[in-house]
Image (cartoon, rainbow, N blue to C red):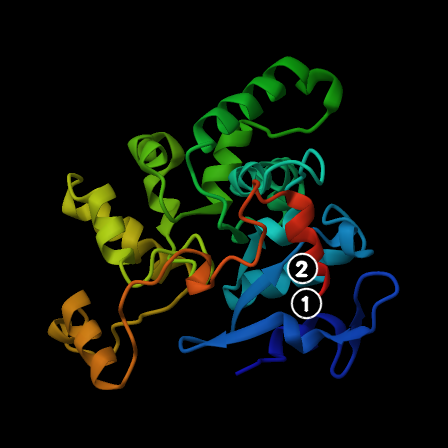
């Protein structure tokens, strides 16, 4: 169900947003979704400058940041809407492009981390969706080094804090399969790490997602597993998926049995979301091949 509450507060009832240049106007109500625990819910954000809007550093967005704080809305920066992953050329193997996609969100993470509006909106939160977490320890180390080495002339005043402190206070991180990142969970900030399934995209291991996750976390203390698998999300998104449900009905086995009873096919599928490859099998699939297919969708 789409909620217009946040949008109406920000831009006025019935107004619209202009999408990227040359595109039709988009009803701004499409940008907010309600959740069971809120009349407003979660908010999907992009790098607005890419779409022809003012930069996220422009005070144009301050009314929106205020609404998000007032309504406890979490902004979400997706790998495809923050800054799309670059590919070397159309002849580059598609595997190289897919490999770099999660890490590409680091560019947006840096932009958000060094933003000054956090000082004015200390309750604002943002999630880096589908970005993984293994790169974050070095990213935080680098951000702090940049501020230490260049802060005297860049004039971004963090006060007594470091960029890494701002990141840990405001940024929620997400992983699908990230054993290295999980080893560094305390350096990243375990209270803001969340697991995601990414269904139905091809990186998703559904219906064996629970087994893949368990293989990564089974040796961790229970309290840490609980934080990363559900408690952090429940707190940050003001969402309780267990409300009104008996614990025994929420296990993996119980949910699978319920799905089968309702006719859901929970058998594993091949990669590509179960699709058969449409590409030439005599050579490596290239970025250009995939770009052509996507252009025709």
Residue 39 visible in the snapshot? no
Mark 2 closeness class: few <14, some 14–19, many ≥20 residues within 10 Å:
few
Give the left or right position of residue 215, taking residue 291 as reference.
left
Between 281 and 23, which is closer to the camera in this rendering?
Answer: 281
Question: Do the numbered discs 2 and 1 sit on residues whose CB atoms are within 8 Å?
Answer: yes
User: In which quadrant of the rendered view does residue 179 lie?
Assistant: top left
Q: As drawn, is 191 to the left or to the right of 279?
A: left
* Residue wearing tag 1: 297
Q: In this rendering, is residue 63 above or below 177?
A: below
What residue lies at 24% left-to-right and 42% top-to-bottom?
A: 216
Q: Which mark is residue 294?
A: 2
Question: In the displayed image of the protein, which residue is found farthest to the top?
Answer: 149
Q: Please, what secondary structure does the residue beneath circle 1 have? A: loop
How far across and how far down the image is residue 134, in percent? 42, 34
What is the spatial separation of the Cα atoms under label 2 and label 1, in whole angstroms? 5 Å
Query: Can you give x and y, in whole percent of width and height, for residue 73 in the image?
Result: 52, 64
Q: Is residue 187 above or below residue 5?
A: above
Residue 212: x, y in percent?
26, 50
Q: Residues within 10 Å of mark 1 (few under 14, many from 20)?
A: few
Q: Residue furthest bottom?
A: 262
Where is residue 132 drawn, in percent x and y?
45, 42
Quadrant where the image shows the C terminus: bottom right
Left or right, residue 37 beside residue 278: left
Residue lying at the far left in this picture: please name it: 248
**Nearest to the observer: residue 191 or residue 87:** 87
Seen from the viewer's position, the closer of residues 69 and 109 is 109
Query: Can residue 258 be seen from the camera position used here?
Result: yes
Give the residue at x 50% y 64%. 72
Kind of element beneath mark 2 = helix
Question: At x 15% / y 68%, what residue is drawn?
Answer: 253
């Amino acid at each position: 169900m789409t909620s217009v509450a946040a949008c109406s507060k920000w831009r006025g009832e019935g107004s619209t947003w202009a999408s990227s240049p040359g595109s039709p106007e988009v009803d701004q109500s499409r940008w907010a979704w309600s959740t069971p625990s809120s009349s407003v819910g979660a908010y999907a954000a992009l790098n607005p400058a890419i779409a022809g809007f003012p930069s996220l550093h422009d005070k144009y967005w301050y009314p929106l940041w205020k609404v998000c704080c007032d309504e406890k809305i979490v902004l979400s920066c997706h790998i495809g809407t923050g800054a799309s992953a670059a590919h070397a050329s159309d002849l580059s193997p598609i595997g190289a492009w897919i490999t770099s996609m999660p890490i590409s969100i680091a560019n947006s993470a840096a932009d958000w981390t060094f933003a000054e509006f956090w000082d004015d909106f200390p309750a604002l939160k943002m999630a880096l969706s589908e970005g993984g977490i293994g790169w974050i320890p070095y990213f935080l180390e680098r951000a702090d080094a940049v501020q230490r080495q260049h802060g005297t002339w860049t004039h971004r005043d963090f006060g007594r804090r470091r960029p890494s402190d701002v990141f840990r206070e405001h940024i929620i991180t997400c992983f699908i399969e990230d054993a290295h990142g999980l080893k560094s969970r305390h350096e990243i900030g375990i209270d803001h790490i969340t697991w995601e399934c990414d269904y139905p995209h091809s990186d998703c291991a559904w219906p064996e997602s629970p087994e893949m996750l368990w293989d990564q976390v089974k040796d961790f203390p229970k309290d840490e597993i609980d934080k990363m698998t559900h408690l952090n999300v429940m707190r940050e998104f003001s969402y309780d998926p267990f409300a009104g449900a008996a614990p025994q009905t929420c296990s993996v086995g119980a949910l699978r049995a319920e799905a089968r009873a309702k006719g859901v096919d929970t058998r594993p599928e091949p990669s590509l979301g179960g699709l058969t490859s449409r590409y030439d099998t005599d050579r490596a699939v290239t970025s250009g091949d995939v770009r052509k297919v996507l252009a025709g969708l």
